[in-house]
Image (cartoon, rainbow, N blue to C red):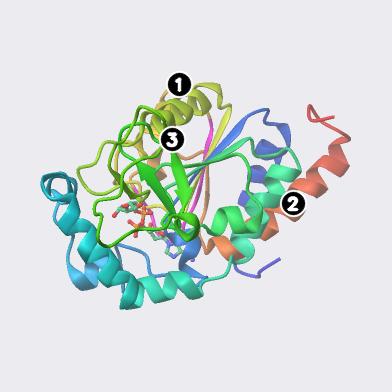
Amino acid sequence: MAADIDGSALARAATLLADARHAVVLAGAGMSKESGIPTFRGDGGLWTVRGEPPLNQYETFSMDPRRWWERRLEQERHADEFAVAIEAAEPNPGHVALAQLEALGAVAHVISQNIDNLHRRAGQRALTEIHGNRMWMRCVSCETRWPRAEFPVDPEALPPRCAQPGCGGIVKGDTVMFGEPIPPSALHQCALETAQADLFLSVGTSAVVYPAAQYPISAAQRGVPLIEINPEPTPLTPLAAVVLRGASGAILPALVEAVRDARARGGETSHS
Ligand code: APR
């Protein structure tokens, strides 16, 4: 175990996870920091460096989707350093450990704010990407999704339209823009998982963006224990039953081992 992890806090977190029947995780950009992708806020964060993006991105798209697509195709030809970092990124030990916690039956669902596809590549199955996935396209009308690599776009016929029978809606990147309504299916799944949660973990998120940040708060307000994994304090810290200060790439693998130990000591718990 990494030397600087608080052993007693880790043991408490592992016991909560080993005993939980429906643990839900809210993941944020901090999880991908160790994959070389900058966070948004804090030192070196994308918004810290570039400034927050306009909050009316979706309004701009809706007013002129053809222009949005012309810019998107141009960006795909000349990717900026953020896109390059995401393209080059590999899942880190934190992503792998979170998928292992799902495979162990210790985590029931992950709500991730990250669009980088790294959870899926690490093997996470029970996953809601609440801000979308940059490798996918989505119809804004019927929510049908396609992998970007399998979605041919004719530059002479912009914006692309949904091919679902009777739809014909405009297709855009799956990433949720500022000002864009989060797809109802994602909101429904997050609410369902939060309602069932008997344990909540917040990993690598500053917990300042809604509705994502509301899920751990709602759970904690009804008495569900909250575990926070983050090198820094956040608005969730006062609500946390256990705080693990540190990097998710070190803490999550240690948590997997600690859950295995807790399970071995306590025999098979409710997950048999
Ligand atoms: N391990 C875990 N957490 C880390 C690490 C690390 N190695 N490094 C940094 N962090 C923490 C920071 O302390 C911070 O609390 O990760 C968090 C990153 O916060 P943000 O950059 O605000 O990212 P996030 O919370 O995911 O932002 C939410 O804001 O701009 C929108 O759509 C964007 O999904 C994003 C949303």
Q: Is residue 21 above or below residue 206?
A: above
Please tell me which of labels 3 and 2 falls first in the chain: 3
Residue contact between numbered discs 1 and 3, judged by CB atoms under 8 Å? no
**Looking at the rendered structure, which numbered label has been put on residue 258?**
2
On the image, the x and y values in percent for residue 213 come to: 36, 39
Q: How much space separates mark 1 and mark 2, taking CA atoms?
A: 27 Å
**23 or 222, which lies in front?**
23
Give residue 222's mark: 1
In front: label 3 or label 2: 3
* First in residue order: circle 1 vs circle 2: 1
Whether residue 147 sits left or right of residue 98 in the image: it is: left
Residue drawn 43% across the image and 37% down it? 144
Q: Can see residue 5?
A: no
Say which element carries label 1.
loop
Report the residue at 50% width, 75% height from top.
88
Say which residue appears at 65% left-offset and 70% top-offset.
3
Towards the viewer: 154 or 210? 154
Give coordinates of residue 258: x percent, y percent.
74, 51
Q: Amino acid at mark 3?
A: Pro
Give x and y (percent) for residue 250: 61, 65
Residue 87 horizontal/vertical position (percent): 47, 71
Could you tell me the amino acid type at mark 1? Arg
Along the viewing direction, whichever of 138 and 241 lies nearer the viewer: 138
Q: Quadrant of ligand 1?
A: bottom left
Q: Which mark is residue 216?
A: 3
Q: Report the side of 168 relative to 5 (left or right).
A: left
The tag on residue 66 is none
Magenta region: 225-234
Q: Are marks 3 and 2 in contact (CB under 8 Å)?
A: no
Sort mark 1 into few (<14), some (14-19) or many (20+) by Cα contacts within 10 Å. Answer: few
